[in-house]
Amino acid sequence: MEITITDTKTIKTLQEEFNSVFPFLKLEVFTKPHKRGEASPKKLINDNSKTLGQCRKKQISGAIKILGNQKVSDVEQLFQDIFGLSVQVFRKSGKIWLETSSTDDWTLNKQNTEAEELSLPVKD
């Protein structure tokens, strides 16, 4: 998938684009970057009605290619390096969203598959 980053795009639109390819994952945009393998405090999540221009440190527009075989940590780092956007991937687990910080070395596909399996109804 290719996502275009512009100052006028909202976080919500970015999330919807990402979620259309990875339905059991979501992106959150934070006010500050995090270190690899570390979680970000939930209080630092930007409101998804904000534009990317309000959240990023680099005012460069362009596209980012995201592939299912990329590691979560690499995707998060790309957003930071290219656009100055501090993002974290979350994985659905039943009815809650888990930050993937402890599994940042998993690929997006693996995260999505694990989340899908955890979201299936339990059979008797």
Image: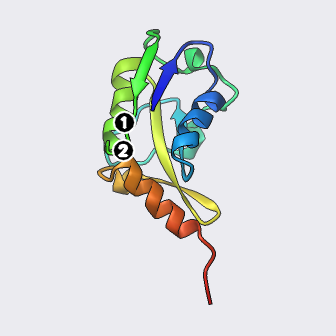
**Left or right: 42 in relation to 103:** right
Q: Could you tell me which secondary element the residue under label 1 belongs to?
A: helix
> Tag 1: residue type?
Val
x, y percent for residue 21: 52, 42
Q: Quadrant of the N terminus?
A: top left
Q: Residue at x 62, y 36 (%)?
A: 16
Q: Amino acid at mark 2?
A: Val
Circle count: 2
Residue 62, above or below 33: above
Task: Quickly name the residue at label 1.
Answer: 75
Residue nearer the viewer, 57 or 116: 116
Kindly identify the residue that appears in the image at 66 percent across and 23 percent down.
Answer: 50
Q: Position of residue 56 (x, y in %)?
A: 49, 19
Q: Are marks 1 and 2 in contact (CB under 8 Å)?
A: yes
* Residue appearing at x 43%, y 19% in the figure: 63
Residue 100 vs 35, above or below: the answer is below
In the foreground, 62 or 76: 62
- The quarter of the image holding the C terminus is bottom right
- Mark 2 crowd level (few <14, some 14–19, many ≥20, 10 Å Cα): many
> What residue sits 32% from the left and 53% below the top?
106
Q: Residues within 10 Å of mark 1 (few under 14, many from 20)?
A: many
State the SS at label 2.
Answer: helix
Q: CA distance from mark 1 to mark 2?
A: 5 Å
Which residue is denoted by mark 2 in the rendering?
72
Q: Residue 6: x, y in percent?
A: 54, 14
